[in-house]
Image (spheres, rainbow, N blue to C red):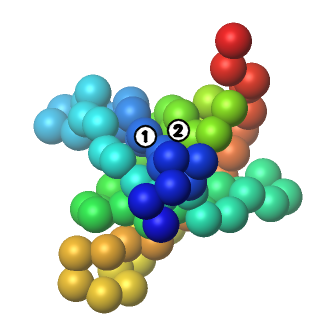
Amino acid sequence: MSDLSNSAVINVAGEGATLGRRVNGTFRQFSKKQLVLGVPERISPSTPVFVHARELVFLGEVHECVEQIPGEYTLEIAVRQAIARM
């Protein structure tokens, strides 16, 4: 999964200690206003995020973040808007 087309960068737009944090992840799926990523750390539900993946920027909110195996999380984001990169 080291293919650059699968890479994603999550900019956390939450408050406090999480504000401005950047997390590298792996794009897994996008369907029906839901984006699924693999990430190395937990991001709390309801946290607003900007995701740079492929040729798009997604704006949304973390719906769920579940640890599948130690150190690997599945992050589900409710997408509010997707914008094509220029």
Tell me the residue that label 1 is attached to.
9
Of 56 and 31, nearer the camera is 56
86 vs 39, left or right, is right
Q: Going by the picture, which residue comes out furthest to the front? A: 3
Circle number at residue 51? 2
Image location (x, y in percent) of residue 37: 52, 61
Report helix, strand or loop for mark 2: strand
Question: The disc labelled 1 sits on which kind of residue?
Answer: Val
The answer to which quarter of the image holds residue 31 is bottom right
Residue shown at 53% from the left, 34% from the top: 52
Image quarter of the C terminus: top right
Element assignment for label 1: strand
Which quarter of the picture shows residue 81? top right
* Image coordinates for residue 85, horizontal then vertical, percent: 67, 20
The crowd level at tag 2 (other Cα within 10 Å; few <14, some 14-19, many 20+) is: many
Image point (22%, 84%), residue name: 70
Q: Is residue 31 visible?
A: yes
Q: Amino acid at mark 2?
A: Val
Q: CA distance from mark 1 to mark 2?
A: 6 Å
Q: How many marks do you count on the picture?
A: 2
